Image (cartoon, grey):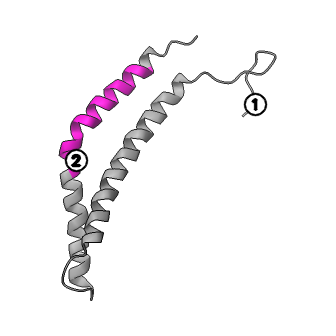
Amino acid sequence: MSDSRGPSLAIVAVAVVLFASLPFLIPPLIWLVLTGYALTKAIGTAPDSASPTSVLLAVVSVVTFLTLAIAGAFWAIGRSMTPKKRGRDGGELPA
C-alpha cells in the first residue's frame, strides 16, 4: 500500500484555501461578468432593460466555473493517490 499522506494533506490545504477564498472571489467575478454584459448591451442595439434570464445565467456560470475548478484541483491532486494498474506478471501495463 502506498503512502498517500502527502497528497491527502495537499487536498486538505487546497480545500481550505479555495473554500476560504470563495466569499472573496464570487462577488468580484459576478461584478466583472455583469459589467461585461452591461457594456455589451450599451454598445449593441439590444433593448435597454437587462434580461433577468441573462443575469441569472451569468451568476450560475460563475458559480459553476468555480465549482468545476475546485473539483479539477481535487482530481489532479488525487490522481497521485490512486495506485497504478499492474499486469498479471506484476509489471506495469503499457500506456
Near mark 2 (Cα within 10 A), the count class, few <14, some 14-19 or many ≥20, is: some
Res 94 label: 1
Residue 85 occupies quadrant: top right
Residue 82 occupies quadrant: top right
Residue on which disc 2 sits? 25
Magenta-drawn stretch contains 11: yes
**Amino acid residing under circle 1:** Pro
View extreme (right): residue: 89
Nearer-the-camera pick, 54 or 17? 54
**Residue 88: image x %, image y %?**
80, 19
> Which quadrant is home to the N terminus?
top right
Magenta-drawn stretch contains 56: no
Residue 10 occupies quadrant: top left
Task: Kindly report which numbered mark, 1 or 2, lies closer to the viewer in this rendering.
Answer: 2
What SS does tag 1 mark? loop
Segment tinted magenta in the rendering: 7-26
> Which residue is located at x 43 percent, y 14 percent?
5
Nearer-the-camera pick, 49 or 91? 49
**Residue 62: image x %, image y %?**
31, 55
**Magenta highlight: main SS:** helix
> Which residue is located at x 33 percent, y 47 percent?
66
Q: Is residue 56 above or below residue 84?
A: below
What SS does tag 2 mark? helix
**Amino acid residing under circle 2:** Leu
Instruction: Say which label, 1 or 2, has the lower sequence index.
Output: 2
Left or right: 48 in relation to 18: left
> Which residue is located at x 24 percent, y 55 percent?
29
Nearer-the-camera pick, 50 or 30? 50
Res 77 label: none
**Residue 73: image x %, image y %?**
41, 37
Left or right: 83 in relation to 75: right
